[in-house]
Image (tube, rainbow, N blue to C red):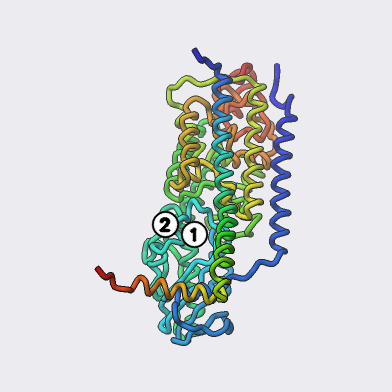
Amino acid sequence: MVEWGVRDRFRIAAQTFALGCLVLLVLFTVYRHQSVKPPVDEQTVLEEIAPGILFGPKGGSPLHLEGRDGSVAFNSYDVTPEIRGYAGPIKVLVRLDRDGNISGLKILSHRETRNYVHRLETPEFLRQFIGKSVRDPFVLDEDLDGISRATVTVQAVGDTLRESGRRVARDALGLAMPGPGGSRQRLAAVAAYGTLFLAAVVLFLLTKRNVRLLRFRDVSLLASLIVVGLWVSSPFSILHGLNVIMSGLPNYPLWYVAVAGVFLTFLLWGRVYCGWICPFGALAEFLNRLPVRKWHVDLEFENRWRNVKYLFFGLAVLSAAYSDSAGAAGFETYVTLFSRNGSWIAWSLVGFVLVTELRVKRFWCRYLCPVGAMGGLLSRNEPGYPSRNDCPMANPRIPPGSECIRCNRCRHSPSGDTLSEVIPDV
Amino acid sequence: MFRLSDKGWLRLAILTGALLVITNLVMNVGEEYLRERFEGMRRKAYFENVISRKGLSLKEARHWRSVEDRENQEAPVIK
């Protein structure tokens, strides 16, 4: 009987290529961090947000520029460099009048994913801050209008303006200011995501021993689709991983649940995220249960074509390295679908993949998904997952750890009973 | 009639997906990197052909251009 792994040279070559691309990205990033970047011409931007007003040189603590009319201007990054969005700090040039109200602002730079923050720099979005006092709470959906599915970034802008504004108003304008603020919605999102993640992992661990709990896997997938996909809109993406390499660690708690948690599960138990938490995987699995005839292929085909995802992962990493922006690596269907934003070509990919999922079990996860590739690189082989006919990944016998999503179905199959001796349906 | 086996259909599906993924990546690189470069080249050409010929610095030119724009906006429309 032919088992998977006999012809694993394709997989080794593809995984080596993907790892090589990651090493290149690290080298590019180190090189770019060492080269000197030209400073942003803040005076020129000041002319836009405070036309006709002269400002003195930058100085004082915290760093700011004093205007002839009693207003002050500052680069938020000089004051609160520790506040970050998903992909590093969001640098804003802000002008405060002598009462601590924002009288002008412009976003100087950020590295957030464009799918989510395409409206961030528009005058319509920024206008809401004009006239606002830095004493205000700057809480999303309370006194701050968000951008749908970009809550983390918008709240990071709010936090940046509030905290940097209060420090400058207190120390440069001599105004009394309240203490630091927070966001209830953000806490709710973190709590929901964290609870769901933890419940899914606990359920995964329990179902390793108790077969009867396996029916709750569908509940976990449905909850993920609703919470991670539709509500929080933060499915794990390779952009999260690339941002760590290119921009460092953010200070947002959801990041640690969504990203650090996923990395940890990849390392400890393999692709548990794909099998229990990924909202797009859930959608693909539910779609595939519709009564449409499935396509059948042989092991050799699978052995070759499943490695394509490592090539795309590598290409995406190279795109990010070349452009010096993690956003350039974005082609993932779940980012487009759950952010509900993307180019026509990105939406074409989503539509095409969803239709194909009807015919092919987890088509995206098996052949194209870069997170699947990343998970595959980090997963180790674990005995006790021999696969069976109803494997959600349509894995043939004894799959490598990189192809198993740890649904735990085959762990409870008596040997030679439900185990497939033939290639299962795809 | 044109008929494909299941393997053929799946191969076609993967290749179509691959084409869409690569197009996506190329468009991303174009948007994130090349557009910035083209914009830089356009600005450089404007600076060399218009601003430096008038003997202005870039900052002065920007200032007078914004003043000009504001005046044009505020000017009453004469019918």
| Discs 2, 1: same chain | yes
Residue with the mark numbered 2:
A147
The residue at 74%/34% (across/down) is A12
Q: Where residue A52 sits in the image (x, y, percent)?
A: 44, 81
* Image quarter (top left, top right, bottom left or bottom right) of the N terminus of chain A: top right
Please say whether residue A216 is visible from this viewpoint. Answer: no
> Is residue A300 found left or right of A256 in the rendered image?
right
- Given the image, what chain letter belongs to the residue carrying mark 2? A
Q: Where residue B41 sits in the image (x, y, percent)?
A: 59, 59
> Is residue A215 found left or right of A323 in the rendered image?
left
First reached walking from the N terminus: tag 2 or tag 1: 2
Which residue is the extreme one toward the front? B53
The disc placed on residue A425 is none
Crowd class of label 1 (few under 14; some 14 to 19; many from 20; radius 10 Å): many
Amino acid type, label 1:
Thr
Numbered disc 2: secondary structure: loop
Q: Where residue A350 sits in the image (x, y, percent)?
A: 48, 37
Nearer to the camera, A219 or A290 = A290
The residue at 56%/38% (across/down) is B21
Count how many numbered circles sit on residues in the image: 2
Which residue is the extreme one toward the top? B1
Q: CA distance from mark 2 to mark 1?
A: 9 Å
Amino acid type, label 2:
Ile
Q: In which quadrant of the rendered view does residue A225 lie?
A: top left
- Given the image, what chain letter belongs to the residue carrying mark 1? A
> Is residue A268 found left or right of A195 in the rendered image?
right
Tag 2–tag 1 contact (CB < 8 Å)? yes
Residue with the mark numbered 1:
A153
Nearer to the camera, A409 or B39 = B39
